[in-house]
Amino acid sequence: MTLNTRGLRAAFLAGALAFAAQAPARADEAEVKDFLLENGLEVVVIPDHRAPIVTHMVWYKIGSADEPPGKSGIAHFFEHLMFKATSNHAAGEFDRAVADIGGSNNAFTSYDYTAFHETVPPSALEEMMGFEADRMRNLVLTDDVIKTERDVILEERRSRIDNDPQAVLDEEVDATLWQNQPYRIPVIGWMQEMEQLNREDAKAFYDTFYRPNNAVVIVAGDVDPDAVKAMAERTYGKVARGPDLRPRIRPVEPEQNTKRTVTLTDARVSVPSFSTQWVVPSYHTAKPGEAETLDLLAEILGGDNRSRLYQQLVVKQGIASGTGAFFQGTMLDATNFTVYGSPRGDAKLSDVEAAVDAEVARIAKDGVTGDELERAKTRYVRSMVFARDKQDDMANMYGSTLATGGNVKDVEEWPDRIRKVTAAEVKAAAARYLVLDRSTTGYLLPQQQAGN
């Protein structure tokens, strides 16, 4: 069970794997199928017959950003509770069934969704569907179960957040970047609110959100779509549809017009670092072509070792040990665009930050060349095509897209939208969004550098 607080993997896959899905079909590949059960559950099947294995995922359209005020952490807490006993299966029975056939299973929580997944032989798929359909509505939640698992998540926060200076800084930067949107609240929750979570909170959360009409099932692997549909109807189809949920309308982020900084000094830090973030549209909120442009801007600026930041700061100037940029496209609401860096040798953090800022400003002022853009398109797509070989990557890509307001068609049409991005659009996006006077920068410094 894991946190997926930033969703970087899904953000990249949402675009790049779509291209892979458009690649010329081989004899062992088949068309992706999408269907809806009568109870509102959406099922997507991605056939891949190269190996006798299947990945099965259930994505619930509920994440930490949907939590009631004062109940931070309930989404992640409930992810843990889903592994407890149901009225039909004892605690641990599901895990043992997966282990007995040599499979694997886990789950993760993010801002916009919670997902549960198993990788097993195709012969076990219907059994996995049965287990997931059962715990969708039949959990047995006692006060003892709640107390025990609450202690687990409290210890998880201490070990993974409170004991990690970078994680602490990330929380503080998020709380500063987002002035109104719930992305400012950590996925794992605030300690003082997590301590108060109880059985009534868990039951209300379960009854509201864990319903077939608020979920998407993704099946990727050595399967036949018609057979999967029949299995889904025999298992998930027995689960009653829940009440219609209200639209996922959240507080809107106001216009940001200040530069903010967050600084954390800690004796455990040996190498200083910084990151600068801007609020930008996501694929779900952007105007047509805008999110694709931001994806390519991130690739040109700091996507890999051929990017501008790497070539200038690491190769030519030799002042950075690491630098880059990324755009978290797969979010339900507005998202963030980030650049970062850390110094090498005798270089100062301020030198690295100034050099990064200069590269951002250069694109905003002078833009990018046509050749540079075309190379970036090819590089961005080809670097991820190999993910086609991983069923879980394909399942993640479709699941994260559908759980944040997209659909199968969005995935299939992504390559054409990427190809339409122009150099003028990249320049305009940098000039519009990457403005230092409207940014949030976080500094992580060794103790002795406090005040520098």
Image (cartoon, rainbow, N blue to C red):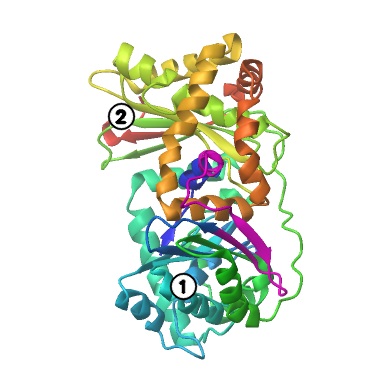
Residue 342 vertical placement versus 329 (above, below): above
Give the quarter of the image for residue 343.
top left
Q: Position of residue 159 (x, y in %)?
A: 33, 59
Q: What residue did someone put label 1 on?
A: 125
Give yes or no for residue 37 being in the magenta stretch: yes
Quarter of the picture containing the C terminus is: top left
Q: In this orientation, does residue 408 appear? A: yes
Using a 10 Å C-alpha cutoff, classify the residue at mark 1 as few (fewer than 14 neighbours), some (14 to 19) or many (20 or more).
Answer: many
Task: Name the image quarter holding the N terminus.
Answer: bottom left
Q: Badge 2: few (under 14), some or many (20 or more) residues near its Cα, within 10 Å? A: few
Name the residue: 37% across, 58% down. 51
Residue 314 relative to residue 83: left or right: left
SS at mark 2 in the image = helix
The residue labelled by disc 2 is: 449
Pick whichever, 279 or 446, lies toward us.
279
Asked if residue 7 lies in the magenta stretch, the reply is: no
Q: Position of residue 425 (x, y in %)?
A: 66, 20
Name the amino acid type tagged 2: Gln
Q: Which residue is depicted at the point 52% across and 56% down?
A: 110
Q: Is residue 340 visible to the viewer in this orientation of the structure?
A: no
Kindly identify the amino acid type of the residue bearing the numbered disc 1: Leu
Query: Farthest bottom residue?
Result: 87
Mark 1 vs 2, N-terminal side = 1
Q: What label does residue 393 carry, if any?
A: none
Q: Which residues are magenta?
A: 16-45
Total numbered labels: 2
Q: CA distance from mark 1 to mark 2?
A: 55 Å
Q: Is residue 422 depicted above or below 195 in this figure? A: above
Nearer to us in this view, 199 or 398: 398
Q: Quadrant of residue 19?
A: top right
Residue 328 image position (x, y, % from top left): 54, 40
